[in-house]
Amino acid sequence: MSEMVERVAKAICLADHGYDVSSDLAPIVTGQYNARARAAIAAMREPTDDVRQALGHIDEHVDKHSRTEHGIRVAGSVCWQRGIDAALGKPGKEDR
């Protein structure tokens, strides 16, 4: 499990019950919160229009040579998706 999944699972449990999943909960309950956390993070994988716009502003201000792969510029939306994939513990495209 990734650190981000664990962090989100704790926050969901805390919001639901006032304590986090690191308390002495049954493993099945902890697993349920981890599943909810993964679903919440996965729902964010496709950036919203507001996020795309913000990423576009970043793209405009960052030196285009600072984020390249094999000579091809990596767009902000791709960086966003890779960040979500990393939070979910998924391998990046280059790892597949």
Image (cartoon, helix red, strand yellow):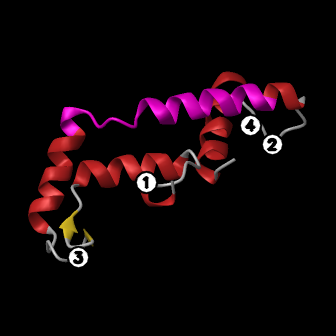
The tag earlier along the polypeptide, 3 or 2, is 2
Are discs 4 and 1 less than 8 Å apart at CB? no
Q: Which residues are magenta?
A: 30-50
Label 3: which secondary element: loop
Label 1: which secondary element: helix
Tell me how far mark 3 sits from mark 4, CA to CA.
39 Å
- Give whichever of 17, 61 is nearer the camera: 61
Q: Which residue is label 4 attached to?
A: 20
Q: Which residue is label 1 attached to?
A: 93
Q: Which residue is label 2 attached to?
A: 22
Are discs 3 and 4 less than 8 Å apart at CB? no
The tag earlier along the polypeptide, 4 or 1, is 4
User: Which mark, residue 66?
Assistant: 3
Tell me how far mark 3 sits from mark 2, CA to CA.
39 Å
Q: Looking at the image, is mark 1 or mark 2 nearer the viewer?
A: 1
Are discs 4 and 2 less than 8 Å apart at CB? yes
The type of residue carrying mark 2 is Ser
Tell me how far mark 4 sits from mark 2, CA to CA.
5 Å
User: Which mark, residue 83?
Assistant: none
